[in-house]
Amino acid sequence: MYGFSLWLVGLTVVVQAAAIAYAFWAGRTGARAYFGLMLLLTAAIVGVFTAQDLLLFYVFWEAMLLPLYVLIGVWGGAGRLGATIKFVIYTMAGSLLMLAAVIVLGLSQGTFDLTASWQSSSDWLFLGFVAAFAVKAPLFPLHGWLPDAYRESPPEVSAVLSGIVSKAAIYGFIRIAITKFPEPTKDFRTVILVLAAVGLVYGSLLAFRAPDIRGVIAYSSLAQLGLITFGVFAVNDLGLNGAVLQMVNHGLITGSLFLLAGGIERRATTGEFARLGGFARGRPILATVLMTTGIIGLAVPGSSAFAGEFAILAGVFSRGWGYSVVGAVAIVLAAMYMLRLISAVLHERVGPAVAPEALDLRPGELGAIVPLLACLLALSVWPAAITERSFAGDRAASAVTNQFRVAAGRPRLDYILVGRSVGSEQQHACLKKYRQALKAGRYGEASSLAETC
Amino acid sequence: MIPRPHVDWFALAPELVLLGAMAFALMGAVLLPRENRRDFGALAAALGFAGAFVYAIVVYVHTPDVHSVIADSVRRDRFGALAQVIVCGAGLLTVGVSYAERMRDEHIAEYYAVLAAAGGGMCFLVTANNLMTLFLGLEWFSISLYILCAIDRELEGSLEAGLKYLIIGGFGSAVLLFGSALVYGATGELAFNRISAAIGDQHLSGDALLVAGLAMIIVGLGFKASAAPFHMWTPDVYEGAPTPVTGFMAAATKTAALVLTLRVLREAFPQEAHLWTIALAAIACASLLIGNLAALVQRSVKRMLAYSSISHAGFMLIPIAANNAIGARALLYYLIPYSAMSVGAFAVVAARERELAAPVTLDNLAGMGWERPLLGVAMGTFMFGFAGLPPTGGFVGKFYAFSAAYRHGWTWLVIVGVVATAVSLYYYLAVVRAMYMRPAAELQLSPTPVAGGAPPRDALLQTSVLLALGATVASFVAVEPLIHVAKHAASALPF
């Protein structure tokens, strides 16, 4: 367990709680099966974020697919059968490549333990893992399943799918691809960064052209995950810290946006912009909530999303200024599609599908969405809560490249509970010196200490 | 006077119990009034399989070392005992499934008697230690299965299935026998270990007669395991036979044939490993290819499951072809969830068949998941298990099988297996899709309740399905003890 996986576990629990609350409010049929599957899904995702063993990671990774398949296939919209087939085939093609890589890697290393210090320099194994993660995230050009799955799922499942499940892929990039394959990461960094850049711009443009609410959110997810991949594959402190913050932000933002989309579709029976409009009139709470979420989503300065995106762009700047330019352009595009969504739903003429008697947000819906929004506002006030507490040893890049082994010196849960540190006394003392040197600004000494620890 | 060998009755206990059950059921068929025959036969067979199951476990526990008994014609070891446990477990579940089957009661006691006999033959086969006992065991259970396939005369296609199986199975047996004769001719030995010794002593490795014999033995066993390209009887026979029998064939026959394949190849022909590993890998690839591609286009669920069993023969030949200790372990482990899933899946098909009084297709499964919650959840789990998704033992089995191939240095075989798994997902999920995601009303299906009300005697079938479901999931959860058991069993083979 590392700081950043704890944040993701927290995100999972919060978004899942909101999704389940929304589903309860919306009154899904077959409630026992539905909530059972939702809980199974939660367990699987938390398992992915906490597994310390490659095989266990894979088992949980596959276990995510099963409930998602049934949730979309049974409770989804009219086009659900096609959407599930696409989703499953894309995902399984990726994750079976990962299975082959897991087998080969584990048997050739002699262990499946992720905390052990092995590393591999095989390009093929690296690509096996990256294929699985890139499909699940998704990265351009493997996003073919995304629009259908996000449109046909029940809104709360879309929220989980884009809010949390995609983060499992990014988690895999950090925890396995970069940590265990340092050399292939260097070799393929440019390819992945370019794909992320393409996905960022392409997703933003498609989001701007999408004809319905869910289309906008779906393609914006593609763009945002491109941005987060930027941060991850920059492999430096700013990039990684920003990526973790942005993962949590994006989870909360798309989570609430999909739940809001669900609420709007319930009232108007459609999510198409052509038939929506004028929702703000007489529905102040809905307008306020959607506006706030949207504004945070377009990364207005002062929001947590701004902090995350800024850190990512600053981080990726060191890998080439071009990436930062693409990222900055995409942020402008984000403002365009998000404002388009807000005005098409809330303002403009009252659409034909919007009945005047359609209600404002009900307490049940607010109960699901407001906590997510509150988390976002709290993070906007204090983004350092995440950026400074995601990686042990104070330095993200060294934590990742040293395979999180510095984490042993930091007080962990077992230390707090039973009063002993997992790392040796020496290591502990060394790290203490390292932190002191870092605080005092003696960076030369600090980096040499980081080497020795 | 011919000297009589010492007989280790204990080693034969599982077979003897099953033969006893057969005798009892047959006596019942003659002596009891017609209305009691069904219950009596089922009880006799169930007790037989349960007794054999327990005895096989006892043999497993009390046989830490390998030894040959009865003039070296039978091998008493944990490898055979574990296979017997799997066969008897499948048989026990099959009795429960059969009891619910709507079958005329004039031959019903014979049905159970022959089922017990088939189980006994398989238990005997997996302990065979020379080419004679091998052939004896093989014919023993094959002849029982020919009868079982054709026993339900009212079932359309049942007789055809039995005849087809008889002819093609007879051909397979003949090839096997001819191969055995060639091997005997080349080495002058029948016992597996002496064949291996003779090959070593007389420098027979690569001898034309021996290689031809070996190839024919592999072909003969390939027929029984329904591996491609010796699979052509499988879809028709599986479709035509009474569904519980199909489940038994898919689970137990495959177990017996594959376990024996590993034993005979490893014990009798270790010097020829460079030949048979390649041959088995090729057969595995062919089975994966043909089984998966053909299953994609099936509408009938029984035919689909038949092709799926062909592709699973391919999956389970991978660890045999790997020819290492982890492969033997993988095969024995994989057979546990595979047998449970096979019997269970065919049991669900049997239940649906009885409800609709029509062959089950993907279309008329629609809505079943909601109408019959237990059967639906179980079928869904079996399908996920066949596809190798956690949390089922199918995942661990595939993982181990691929690991064995990698250990052998065949990464390409791992890739083939992985691709085949991806393809198989499409047709397995089609069943889940049909059961849960399509409303029954869409097809205007109405279950036809024959003679009014719920189908009779469903409780035993549901119990069997529940047990199969339990075994499928438990083999994932309790993977460590099971692997341990498989490891001990596999150590009986000379690796």
Image: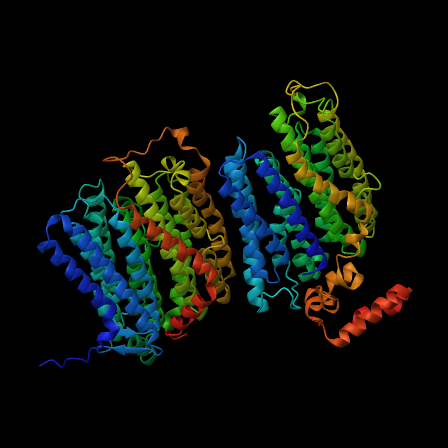
Q: Is residue B144 left or right of residue A201?
A: left
Q: Is residue A83 left or right of residue A401?
A: left
Viewer-closest of B324 and B184? B324
Percent position (x, y) of residue B57?
A: 32, 69
Percent position (x, y) of residue B488?
A: 40, 73
Viewer-closest of B137 and B477? B477
Residue B330 visible in rendering: yes
The residue under the point 42% across, 48% down is B383
The relative height of residue B374 versus residue B138 in the rendered view (above or below) is above
Residue A199 visible in rendering: no
Percent position (x, y) of residue B463?
A: 33, 52
Q: How is the image coloured?
A: rainbow
Percent position (x, y) of residue B481?
A: 44, 68
The relative height of residue A8 versus residue B3 in the rendered view (above or below) is above
Q: Quadrant of residue A163?
A: top right
The furthest residue to the front: A363
State the quadrant of the C terminus of chain B: bottom left
How many numbered discs sit on the rendered protein? 0
The residue under the point 31% across, 72% down is B58
Q: Quadrant of residue B455?
A: top left
Viewer-closest of B109 and B284? B109
The residue under the point 26% across, 50% down is B98
State the quadrant of the N terminus of chain B: bottom left
Q: Quadrant of residue A98?
A: bottom right
